[in-house]
Amino acid sequence: MSATHPSAGGPDPSAPPPAWLGDIADGVAAWTRSAPAPPLDPVAQGPDADPESVARTILLEQLTGRARSRRELADKLASRNVPTEIATRLLDRFEEVGLVDDAAFARTWVGARQSSKGLARRALAQELRRKGVDDEVAREALDEVDPEQEREAARALVRKKLRSLRTVDDVVATRRLVGMLGRKGYGPGLAFAIVKEELAARGAGEDLPESPEWDGP
């Protein structure tokens, strides 16, 4: 149990950081144990509900299951009519205790989306920007992407798509595959090189055009 200030009853700022600091799942559990249990749907309690309790409950609900960016959380609070002053104060507090961390969120998001969707850095950067992650924070997370791993992800995408292209000619297959990789964030040079290699590997790449028709995003 964390130390409390003798007069205010809240966390003592001079106390050592709690063991769960930075761990979202444990942090949510610790926060929930240390505070009075909120109603299941505080917003349904009407205009007399305490706005700060409502906001805190919304944040804890949003952070249960996965991390979220500060912008995502701020947008959620705004959609639930939480006053801006209260939202900012609580988000600052959540950042202080490690429950909101855009750098950690960006790293987790990049790893998960590259693994599950095979997205390249350009597409990942666009997603992080839409989630309100600062460009510099996003760049640090994207710098951790291994170029060779990215290349192999592109190859895996092409091999999977090729299964449905057995009946089309090489030119059409090239256009569709390069376009698919473009929508995943891969540049035309890498996309065409991977497609050409994979078509050649299945014995159908001898007559590929030198410059594919690019239909990326």
Image (cartoon, grey):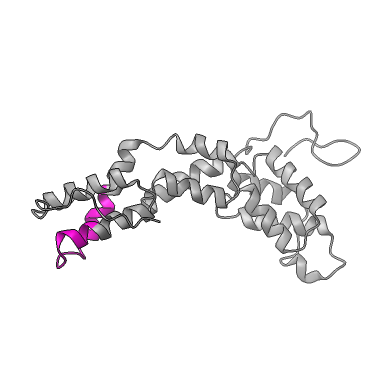
Q: Which residues are magenta?
A: 155-174
Magenta span main SS: helix
Instruction: Determine the residue positioned at 78% across, 54% down.
Output: 36
Residue 92 falls in image quadrant: top right
* In the image, residue 8 lies in the stretch drawn in magenta: no
Q: Position of residue 46 (x, y in %)?
A: 83, 71
Q: Looking at the image, can residue 112 be seen?
A: no
Is 213 located above or below residue 89 in the figure? Answer: below
Q: Position of residue 120 (x, y in %)?
A: 39, 46
Instruction: Determine the residue positioned at 23% across, 44% down.
Output: 193
Left-right relation of 101 to 196 = right
Left-right relation of 65 to 46 = left
Q: Position of residue 123 (x, y in %)?
A: 44, 49
**Which quadrant is the N terminus positioned in?**
top right
**Which quadrant is the C terminus positioned in?**
bottom left
Instruction: Determine the residue positioned at 26% across, 57% down.
Output: 177
